Amino acid sequence: MTALDRYVRLEATGLWSESREAGPREVIVSFGNATLMLKDLADAPLGHWALAGVTVLGRDGDGTTYAMSADGGETLEIRDPEMIAAIATVTRAGAGPGSAPRRRRRRLPLTPLLVVAALAAIAWAAPRTLHPDPALLVPPDRAAEIGDRMLITLVERHGAPCDDAAGNAALARLAERLAPEAPPRIRVLPLGDTPAAALPGGTVLLDASLAAAPAEVLAGWAALALGRDPAASLLAAAGPVADLRYLATGRFDEPALARATAAALAPPQAPEAAAALARLAAARLDPAPFAAALAAAGLPPGAPAVAEPAPIAERDRVALRAICAP
């Protein structure tokens, strides 16, 4: 039984503010499947918060205030000690303020047409190829939920994400610089022998040891993870039987997710390294430190030249180095 399973059906009251302008209202908070579900006192649903995206905004006596976005516009205050302990156990208290915004989401069933199209694609495709565009089979809302479940597994296995407000704000700025069109949510946590990983739903994970490296090296591994296709990796690792079950039910079982989580921790490959160096250059980040790290890892460096690199701000360098400090 996972930590998540132990707390399903746990409920408590809380004070929810939908925005900075909205006054707090009393709500019922309950654990769902990788989410906190918010309902009013008449049992009408108000929204879902992904557990892996919950961050601690502040503490006041017995109460803890949580947020789901970097600006803290939507907040939830809980004073029930059992619920606070449960959130801390499952999410390890989140990653604090400064994280990338996450939308509230609800599950949407796959439409019959999508199922039919996907099954046709499976019948047509080669044995290990499910669809030319895996994003069609794993839409954004579903991908984010699956990625959250995988992140919870990694947190339980390896340890909590580093929780520092200034460091997370620096990571958010770095994400916007590397992928301005769709900044990922970057988290730093122990990953064992893996420097970086990408999860469905736009989450990039970096190993905690990278906090001691130059900021350009940390940026390089984030750029490498951004070059991966986590939806394709998910479908390939889960296997055809689990994929067919997912198409029918909209869910992956725990063994399939375990395989997908292990696949997300795959070691970097030379083509990924080359693409990451190019992404650094496009962001006007000096690729030389990351190229040296790649050489030390046994991957061909070949750093492209950047005519006028824009350095990472010193405040962000300091914050990134301290993000995992006790």
Image (tube, rainbow, N blue to C red):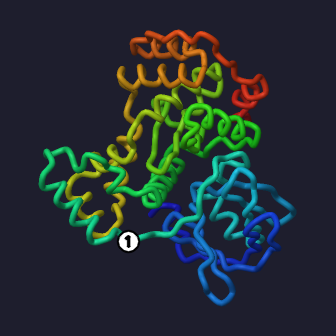
Q: Residue at x 33, y 48 (%)?
A: 259
Residue 107 is situated, as x and y percent measured from the top left of the image, at 46, 69
Reply above or below: 253 against 12: above
| Farthest bottom residue in view | 42
Residue 24 is situated, as x and y percent measured from the top left of the image, at 80, 74
Residue type indicated by callout 1: Pro
Q: Residue at x 76, y 70 (%)?
A: 17
* Quadrant containing the C terminus in the rendered view: top right
* Front position in the image: 232 or 36: 232
Q: Residue at x 67, y 69 (%)?
A: 83
User: Under tag 1, what secondary structure?
Assistant: loop
Crowding near the residue tagged with mark 1, few <14, some 14–19, many ≥20 C-alpha atoms within 10 Å: few
Q: Residue at x 57, y 55 (%)?
A: 52
Could you say which quadrant of the image residue 287 lies in?
top right
Task: From the image, tell me which residue sits under label 1.
Answer: 109
* Quadrant containing the N terminus in the rendered view: bottom left
* Front position in the image: 148 or 254: 148
Residue 300 is situated, as x and y percent measured from the top left of the image, at 39, 12
Could you say which quadrant of the image residue 138 lies in?
bottom left
